[in-house]
Image (cartoon, rainbow, N blue to C red):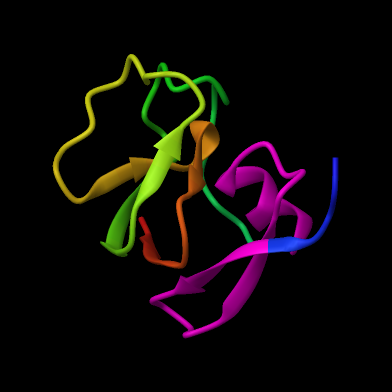
Amino acid sequence: MTDRPTASITLAETSQCLEFSAGCPSILHCLESMKIDAAFQCREGYCGACRATLVSGKVDYNEEPLAFVRDGEILLCCCKPNGDIHIKLK
């Protein structure tokens, strides 16, 4: 595993830009490591508590989430950015 940045995550609320590292398991984990509060519960894509709006960019899911995900939404606990993304936390 490496900690080199592979993508940037921009937060709509603050315009803060974070670097996502290749060794990071999820966007939620990355946010937590930067001391950014994000809602969560199951960490497995079951509950949908970590739902966020994907303003721009694409994500890849580690595994297909069981919680319903609308167009334009992502579950932070079980996905990684596929390139640079812009998100809005709920």
Q: In the visual, does 26 lie left or right of 1?
A: left
Quadrant in which the N terminus is drawn? top right
Quadrant in which the C terminus is drawn? bottom left
Most distant residue in the left direction:
71
Q: Residue at x 38, y 64 (%)?
A: 87
Q: Is residue 60 above or below residue 6?
A: above
Q: Is residue 76 magenta?
A: no
In the image, the segment drawn in magenta is 6-35
Q: Is residue 73 above or below residue 56?
A: above
Q: Nearer the viewer, residue 27 or 35?
A: 27
Tell me residue 63's x, y (percent): 46, 19
State which quadrant residue 28 falls in: top right
Q: Residue at x 71, y 49 (%)?
A: 22
Q: Is residue 59 above or below residue 25?
A: below
Q: Is residue 33 magenta?
A: yes
Q: Residue at x 16, y 38 (%)?
A: 70
Q: Is residue 35 visible?
A: no
Q: Nearer the viewer, residue 22 or 52?
A: 22
Q: In the visual, does 43 lie left or right of 86?
A: right
Most distant residue in the bottom direction:
15
Q: How many marks?
A: 0
State which quadrant residue 43 falls in: top right
Tell me residue 13's x, y (percent): 41, 78
Q: Residue at x 60, y 40 (%)?
A: 26
Q: Is residue 29 visible?
A: yes
Tell me residue 45's x, y (percent): 44, 22
Tell me residue 52's x, y (percent): 35, 51
